[in-house]
Amino acid sequence: MTAVDELELLRTSAGVVDRSDRGAVLVTGPDAFSFLQALVSADLDPVLDGHGASSLLLTPHGKLDVAFRLLRVGDDAWLDCDPGTGERLAASLNRFRIRVKAEVIDRTAEWGMVSVIGPAAADAIPGAHPEALHEHVALDGARLVRTEHGFDIVGPQAAVDAITRELTASGVAAVGPVAYDAFRIDTGIPLQPFDIDERTIPQEAFLELEAVSFTKGCFLGQELVCRIDSRGHVNRFLRHITGIDGEWPVPGTEIVVAGKVVGEITSVAPPELGVGALGYVRHEVEPGTDAELRSETGTARASVTAIATDAPAAGS
């Protein structure tokens, strides 16, 4: 099955994507949630056992440190984040762990995750299914988590592997990383550190729509984020770059409008998948604007469009 076929499965049926390269952090202890509540951007007080939230750990200056999803499992917080960021998340949290009864453990090496994505995802997984976004239930030693596009199965690697074998044996097709990355780009899910990094203000990538509470009270980096929300704007937005005609771009390709460089490409899918790319453009460039893409190897024509939802979710 080609990547084109796999992408079509994710759009129209269901496919299983191995995402065990994601970072995984456990925060446990009697002060786990009060410790996190004082630091992270989401309001964790309403998050009960069996539920979760998208959140951000920001720097004191309001820029992104790590984007993550939190699941409440009993009195423990299960955090998962983009590949390569688990160690960073654990280290950043530990820097603030002073005189609190909480442990922060990077368990990326022994933790796993697969995603079942597509409109038929529920049919592919037997048993009861959580309905609300980030709601989760026990499943054979792991947790089954509702996402925007289907379900994630998160837990010890052995448990996740066993469930994955059962799913594929039942006829659910495995989908590779190329097709999944194209799906991610098409649906506007930013990937750290490519589309979001330590320079990112949450509003630039619409992270604040789901991952930031403006009513919870103080959290790390709150001042900048709230000031922009109440009386400011950011200088750039994450956009979908579509209708590419010409030299296929690579990350770093310049986006040019009316002869002026207004941004650059951050992620790009192979041309045969028909998805296009993600990139940042100046805030004054409206969706629907025609653009030129310039790289060392050539140029292309393209269109700047809004990402699919303008509300990407960590863990989707």
Image (cartoon, rainbow, N blue to C red):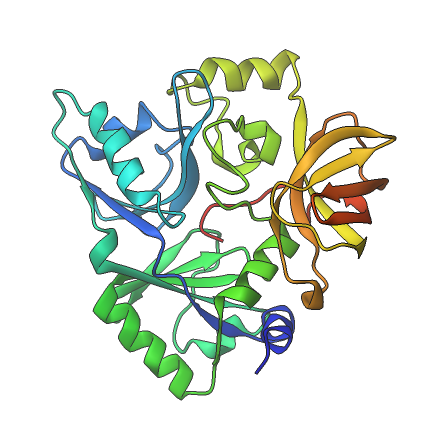
Q: Which residue is pictured at 54% across the width and 55% down the height?
A: 148
- The quadrant in which residue 112 appears is bottom left
- On screen, residue 234 above or below 18: above
- On screen, residue 61 above or below 124: above
Asked if one can make out residue 141 in the rendered structure from this viewpoint, the answer is no
Asked if one can make out residue 20 in the rendered structure from this viewpoint, the answer is yes
Along the line of sight, the residue nearer the viewer: 294 or 59: 294
Q: Report x, y in % for residue 209.
A: 57, 35
Q: Report x, y in % for residue 24.
A: 29, 49
- Residue 286 lies left or right of residue 9; in this view the side is right
Q: Report x, y in % for residue 65.
A: 40, 30
- The quadrant in which residue 89 appears is top left
Along the line of sight, the residue nearer the viewer: 147 or 87: 87
In the rendered image, the quadrant that contains the N terminus is: bottom right
Q: Which residue is pictured at 67% across the width and 50% down the height?
A: 277
Q: Report x, y in % for residue 38.
A: 31, 23
Along the line of sight, the residue nearer the viewer: 285 or 149: 285
Q: Which residue is pictured at 45% across the width and 58% down the height?
A: 146
Q: Which residue is pictured at 80% across the width and 49% down the height?
A: 300
- On screen, residue 307 above or below 183: above
Callout count: 0
